[in-house]
Amino acid sequence: MRFRRLSVRYRELGPGAVLRLYGDPWILPLPIPMARPEWRPPVDYCESNGELTVKIEVAGMTDDQFEILLYQDVLVIQGDRPWRSSGAEARFHLAEIRYGPFRLELPIPGDIDRERVTARYEQGFLTVHLPKASPS
Amino acid sequence: MTPGPNPPRTVSVPEIPNLLPILPLRESVMFPLAVMPINVGQERSLRLVDDVMRTSRVVGLVAQRRAQGTAAGLEDLYGTGTAAVIHQMVRNQDGTMQLVVQGLERFRIDELVQTEPYFIARIRPAPEVESTGNEVEALARTVRSLFERLIALRTDLHGELSGVLENLGGNVQVAYFIAGAVPLPAAVRQEILEGDTSLAKLRTLVPLLQHELAVQELQKKITTDTREQLSKSQRDFMLREQMKTIQRELGESESQNSEVRELRQKLEEAKLPPEPRKEAEREISRLEQMPPGSPEYGMVRTFLEWLVALPWAKTTGGEIDIAKSRQILDEDHYDLEKIKERILDYLAVQKLRQERQVHAPAVSGDSSPLPVTPEDEARREPILCFVGAPGVGKTSLGQSIARAMGRKFVRVSLGGVHDEAEIRGHRRTYIGALPGRVIQALRRAETRDPVFMLDEVDKMSASFHGDPAAALLEVLDPAQNQAFVDTYLGVPFDLSRVLFICTANTVDTIPPPLLDRMEVLTLSGYTEEEKLHIARRYLLPKQIAAGGLIPSELRVDDAAIRKIIREYTREAGVRNLERQLATIARKAARWITEGVKPPIVVGPERLQELLGRRRFYDELAERIDRPGIATGLAWTPTGGEVLFVEATMVPGREDLLLTGMLGEVMKESAQAALSFVRSNASRLDIDPKVFEGKSIHVHVPAGAIPKDGPSAGVAMMTALASLAKGVPVRNDVAMTGEITLRGKILPVGGIKEKVLAGFRAGVKTIILPQRNEDMLEEVPEEARGSIRFVLADSAEKVLEVALAGKSAPESKPESGARAIH
């Protein structure tokens, strides 16, 4: 169901808007903009000879706090960065790090060898490898 | 970690505690899922944010009921707010904070559990209910279409917004989204927030959107209109500036300005009455707007020049001295006693009026058409009409009147005028249009009370261009001419102070309505004696001066002048006489320059040398040499004429042939004459058989001149009787009169002119109708003395006189009469 909604959105905004799509998709130049409640971590998405690599910067997590979903044409990575209260005396001057639920959606080509997809979380980066299916 | 086709887990949102710190918002309302920057400055709010930042980072955002002041308790806040998470926070140098918050969920405040240092409320989450059903569907569609129209109108709303609507989770979010996108007052947004169902929210939204749409449409229209207006006036301005530059380059603008200035100044000086003044002002301001190159510029300028050049207020009529006037008239004209009397009467009236102030002030300046008052009626100038043969002094009489009155004299010849526009002017729209002759003459006169001579009013004719006489009616009618409107000027001009004098050769061709407005004064032709005086006193001195001579150098004796009058001219007036004298004067001038010693004396014997062969011979003696010819007297516009009626008989069919361009009346008159002669043959001592088997031919020379009228009846009867009896008519007898079938002689007009014509021709006896006896008084003494008048009332009496002798008796020349050879 979620898959279906996503596919509609891709088509509507078209190729020119793709980059913006990966940001907070509802934030638009409005008096009061609206956005999804989830935030979106920064991502590198690159392609080499044999595979596609998705690298997400999201620190302060443990392996089991990620949920990675692979649809026919979309890769969804979501999770919840936990927020722990600071000390009673703490007084913030600047707060830019977002906590709580995040969500990332990336389109993927269809020729992925789904059996060989791997993911690893290391030093604050989550890396997902998507090997291309070898032509048979 | 291994990806798999697991159903997606609902991602948790930050938990909302039951006790929530409340941050009051001024003039804004937070919606769930909305992202909003907030500035925080109040001490208690800073404390609140400090505390929240290190704990849950969730605050309750509730709008204040009033925009100003600090909320003191629950009563100052709305009961519904939105719990929001603080995404980002920056503390500024001055201690205030900027936050970026995002709404999470709607809540209602149950109670305040803490007011100091900041509010903490016990809240209860109040999630919106997504309505279902047809109504909400319809409302949603309405809202969307309204919103799309609004986007199209507003440039500040992003075009992509309409696409976003499709992707929002539900109608609740649609409502919030639109409420956030459209500028609305906080109270209205709060109302939308408080609606519990999507249905309620959309219902609130629809009228608001409709209102906003209407306002926007109106605003856009206003903007467009003003822009169009602005751009048009800007464009005009630009073009005008460019035009000015071009004109400056061409060196035109300076002259235009000076022209306009000059016209304005003239306008001031001309003292126009209010109505023409208004018209002139209007035209001047039009002129200023025009480029000098445009064809209309010239038209408008000419019009204005006419307007300012007219004598609206100028008069010259000065003091009138009757004795001096008499002197002036006598100086200029010989005799004409009756006319002079009439003119002096008129001048006397003017003088008395002037002295007794019946006259309106000379400069009234007001020519607007007012109702005619008896006083106006009284100060009207009469319209005189001089009727007489050419050269009798009609025009010069007008000049004398002007001189006597101290007024300007203008003259307009109407001979041959056949177009109404000549009198009244052409419409200004025509190229080369001009005012009529009346206005043109007034401009020449430069005063509004000149003596205005309308020459040859009898020679106007009507054509398809209209009847100029009808236009003249307006000019000459004292009841209308104080507001005479020339078609070209289009504004009234007061003609009531103008003294109009018309001249004509005959009153017969003047249209009766026009004649009715005039006082006719008749100038008859002059006798030889009068002509001699005129020549001596006026013509000869004038021609001597014109020839560059001094009076002592040329002497023409009376006998020579008489000879000129008799043998070189035949006219009622003196024009040809003057011409002959001019010829003599020129010849004299030439001789003097060739060395002949003055004075040059001209006697009758030198005329052949000076003027050539004599021009006129006595016709009577030469023409009447056999029976069947009679001398008639005719009246013509140029004075009287002698004419001959010739009758002859040839064997043939018994009928009457009439030739000589005779009019209907004259032909009938000839038939009547013949019938009378035949029916009374025995009584008239005529052989009744003389007409049998004969065709009778009556001819009246000169054959090329049209003739008409009944007054030749007697002459024709006499000619026929003479023919029938074989007795010639006496060659010194002339006659006039109408004849009836019974032989009665009826009176005719123009007796004076006819008698003078006969006198000039050397007639000794003139037969006149009995009933014309009283008109003999008009005949000048000189003619009366040398002609025998026979008054006849019957044909018998006429024949008795006309056929008295067997042949014309030879007679010796008498004093004052012509010799008959």
Image (cartoon, grey):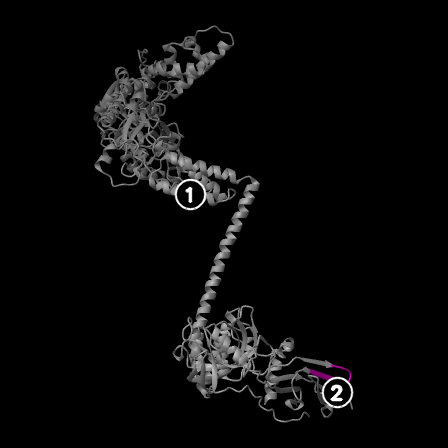
Pick the front one: A106 or B539:
A106
The image shows residue B559, relative to residue B446, as above or below, that is above
Q: Are marks 2 and 1 in contact (CB under 8 Å)?
A: no
Q: Relative to residue B438, is residue B352 depicted above or below?
A: above
For mark 2, does the 10 Å Cα neighbourhood hold few (<14), some (14 to 19), or many (20 or more) residues? many
Q: What amino acid is found at the position of numbered circle 2 in the picture?
A: Lys
Question: x%, y% of residue B647?
Answer: 34, 28
Q: Chain of mark 2?
A: A
Mark 1 belongs to which subunit? B
Point 53% across, 51% down: residue: B238
Residue B367 falls left or right of residue B291? left
State the separation of the CA atoms marked 2 and 1: 91 Å
Q: Residue furthest top?
A: B597
Q: Where's the C terminus of chain B, which quadrant? A: top left
What span is in magenta?
A47-55
Q: Residue A17, relative to residue A4: is it above or below?
A: above
Asked if residue A53 is among those painted magenta in the image, a careful observer would answer yes
The quarter of the picture where the N terminus of chain B appears is bottom right
In-front residue for pair B2/B694: B2
Query: Where on the picture, by quarter, is residue B87?
Result: bottom right
Camera-nearest residue between B59 and B402? B59
Disc 2: which residue: A132
Q: Is residue B314 magenta?
A: no
Instruction: Give the residue at mark 1.
Output: B283
Q: Is residue B468 visible?
A: yes
